């Protein structure tokens, strides 16, 4: 691990820049419209701004040398908490973020947003943040090395409540959405100056490659922790340890304790 801790003034400057990027991205994507089968679009950068901004302030205490980039909010993760991969218990009990969450308008009746009162567990978020907790022990130590973000801040729901991922949108809708998300990713990289951007899954890796084309930023990939990924269900934490080691990333051994990945 490297020591990338910054002083208070630099931390404030970094978090202010990240907040500006998030506000701008929220405004850009919030003006877009999506046709059926998408019936509801959740923008947690609007209704969950308080916990999202608290998360960015927390990250600003240090400059992550590696960006872990996810796809977009899951209905039981960031859509509830405003935090990327934001499984409720991890956000509350490990990251220590307790901010209130408003309700999206309109709200899908089968996908209510109840914030930290959400009874559902988001497996991908539990695995990712559980891995971070078991290796780095405290959020501050983790954020000296890593910054976790989502490429797209919107969650797309169909009439049935089914989650629709950005890659399944028609090309006519993806173009404007991806242009805004690309700009935000480039601005984030300019702010954090990471040595490595790692896509969590193939979609995020592909978008990082496209957005950062022409730069000297190295882009790589780790397995997505979703239970829809068979490899993740055979021990995602150990798999990611191996993948990061192959990329030359030094990760402490697991310390144990706390709920295990499920």
Image (tube, helix red, strand yellow):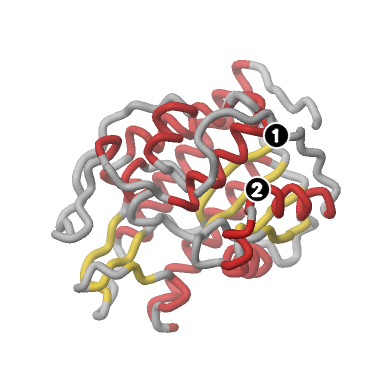
In percent of the image, x 70 and y 34: which residue is there? 254
Give how far apart the Cα atoms at labels 1 and 2 are. 9 Å
Q: Position of residue 71 (x, y in %)?
A: 51, 61
Relative to 142, 219 lies left or right: right
Quadrant of res 255: top right
- How many residues crowd around disc 2 within 10 Å: few (fewer than 14), some, or many (20 or more)? many
In percent of the image, x 27 and y 42: which residue is there? 118
Which disc is residue 201 wearing? none
Which disc is residue 254 wearing? 1
Q: Are marks 1 and 2 in contact (CB under 8 Å)?
A: yes
Q: Secondary structure at mark 1?
A: loop
186 or 35: nearer the eye? 35
Q: Position of residue 130 (x, y in %)?
A: 55, 39
Q: Is residue 115 above or below residue 237?
A: above
Relative to 107, 173 lies left or right: right
First of labels 1, 2 by sequence position: 2
Quadrant of res 75: bottom left
Which disc is residue 237 wearing? 2
Q: Quadrant of the N terminus?
A: top right
């Amino acid at each position: 691990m490297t020591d990338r801790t910054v002083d208070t003034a630099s931390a404030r400057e970094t978090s202010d820049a990240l907040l500006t990027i998030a506000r701008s991205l929220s405004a850009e994507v919030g003006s877009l419209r999506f046709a059926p089968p998408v019936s509801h679009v959740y923008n947690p950068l609007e209704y969950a701004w308080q916990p999202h901004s608290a998360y960015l302030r927390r990250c600003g205490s240090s400059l992550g040398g590696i960006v872990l980039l996810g796809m977009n909010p899951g209905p039981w993760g960031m859509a509830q908490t405003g935090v990327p991969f934001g499984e409720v218990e991890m956000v509350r009990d490990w990251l220590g973020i307790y901010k209130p969450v408003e309700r999206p308008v309109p709200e899908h009746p089968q996908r209510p947003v109840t914030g930290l009162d959400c009874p559902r567990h988001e497996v991908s978020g539990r695995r990712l943040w559980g891995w971070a907790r078991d290796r780095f022990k405290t959020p501050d130590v983790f954020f000296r090395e890593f910054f976790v973000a989502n490429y797209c801040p919107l969650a797309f729901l169909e009439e049935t409540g089914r989650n629709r991922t950005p890659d399944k949108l028609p090309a006519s809708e993806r173009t404007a959405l991806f242009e805004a998300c690309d700009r935000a990713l480039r601005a984030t990289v300019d702010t954090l100056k990471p040595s490595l951007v790692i896509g969590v899954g193939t979609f995020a890796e592909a978008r990082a490659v496209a957005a950062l084309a022409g730069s000297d930023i190295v882009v790589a990939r780790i397995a997505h922790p979703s239970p829809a990924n068979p490899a993740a269900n055979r021990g995602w934490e150990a798999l990611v340890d191996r993948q990061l080691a192959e990329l030359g990333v030094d990760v402490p051994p697991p310390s144990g304790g706390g709920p295990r990945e499920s």
